[in-house]
Amino acid sequence: MIKIMKDSFLQTLLLTLGSSICAFAVKAFLIPQGFLSGGLTGAALIVYYLHPAVSLTTIYLLLNIPIFLLGLYFVSIRFFLYSLWGMLIYSIMLHLITFQIEIPDQMLSAVVAGGITGLGMAIILRSRGSTGGSDIIGVIFHKLFSLSIGTGAVMINIGVLAVSALLFPTDKALYSLIYAIVVMQATNAIYHGMKKRKAAIIISNHCDAIANILTHNHRVGITKLNGKGGYGGTDKTILFSVIHQKDIAAFKKLVLEKDPDAFMAMMTAGDVTGLRIGNQPQW
């Protein structure tokens, strides 16, 4: 019971922190400049600018109903419930945050708002839910087509901004597009970069000893592959592992202590799914 309460508190903390950051970007930067957001927030802003008598929070809640039904069908009931909770938190934050930041440079406003929103979205998506809207659609695209979260979101954003270009000044739509692109880049960089990993390949005449030290003494997962030297044609054992960025220096030191002539190649592993080392989503 205590474990469940701790987990629920952590999920709520992530959703609240991320929602506060996203709502801050919308209310402090986007609305003062007359910019549009992407996804359902952008669609809600279109309606809000055309009919300001209706609150932005109410519009956002109504637009989310069909999107939540899709999330329930394609993802999971747990994701649906946490996303419902996240949407309510986000709606409250949109209502509570009222102050604005006036920045004369519209380009700077678009870039800053995009970076802030990307940070907030990445934090939200590290939880087991979302704040609804394009987040849910992005998760569905990720689950069905393996598109990155940011890429799926920007596809939706482009559609919303294309509509806004017909209703609002072109410069506002273009600045909003810049904002959406920055959001995509920031979300991908932060979400997929929260756990930076490297794929390591080791070729050595002492692979068995190296593997034994890494697996038994340091609990590093190792896979042995069979290979053949291209020049001499001799059989080789190749070690493959995926490790955290912070462990690379110690990893190299351990290998070179056992075999100073070992060959090592480190490659970026952007999206890893697996026990302990993976960055698979929690949905």
Image (spheres, rainbow, N blue to C red):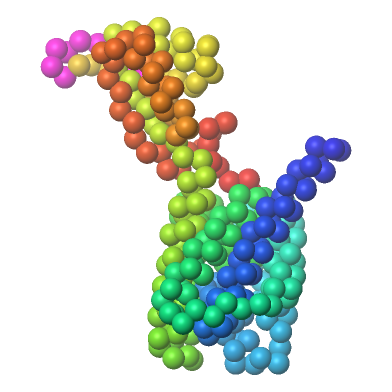
Residue 16 point in image, percent of width and height: 71, 59
Instruction: Identify which residue, 50 or 254, lies in the foreground.
Output: 254
Q: Residue at x 74, y 64 (%)?
A: 89
**Number of callouts:** 0
Magenta range is 230-239
Taking the spot 71% from the left edge, 92% from the top edge, the residue there is 53
Residue at the outermost left position: 231
Name the residue at 65% across, 50% down: 127
Split into 4 quadrants, where in the image is the N terminus? top right
Give the quarter of the image for residue 256.
Answer: top left
Q: Is residue 125 above or below residue 214?
A: below
Which of 103 and 173 lies nearest the eye of the viewer? 103
What residue sits 75% from the left and 70% below the top?
Answer: 92
Q: Nearer the viewer, residue 11 or 142?
A: 11
- Residue 239, given in percent of the width and then of the height, sits at 37, 19
Q: Is residue 75 within the magenta segment? A: no
- Whole-percent x and y of residue 231? 13, 17
Q: Based on the picture, tell me whether residue 236 belongs to the magenta stretch.
A: yes
150 displayed left or right of 136: left
Quadrant in the rendering for residue 259: top left
Front-most of residues 75 and 57: 57
Q: Would you identify the image quadrant in which residue 45 lies?
A: bottom right
Is residue 144 at least partly visible in the picture?
no
Work out whether residue 13 can be spotted: yes
- In the rendered image of this protein, does residue 103 appear above or below residue 79? below
228 in relation to 30, above or below: above
Where does residue 128 sit, x and y in percent of width and height?
Answer: 67, 50
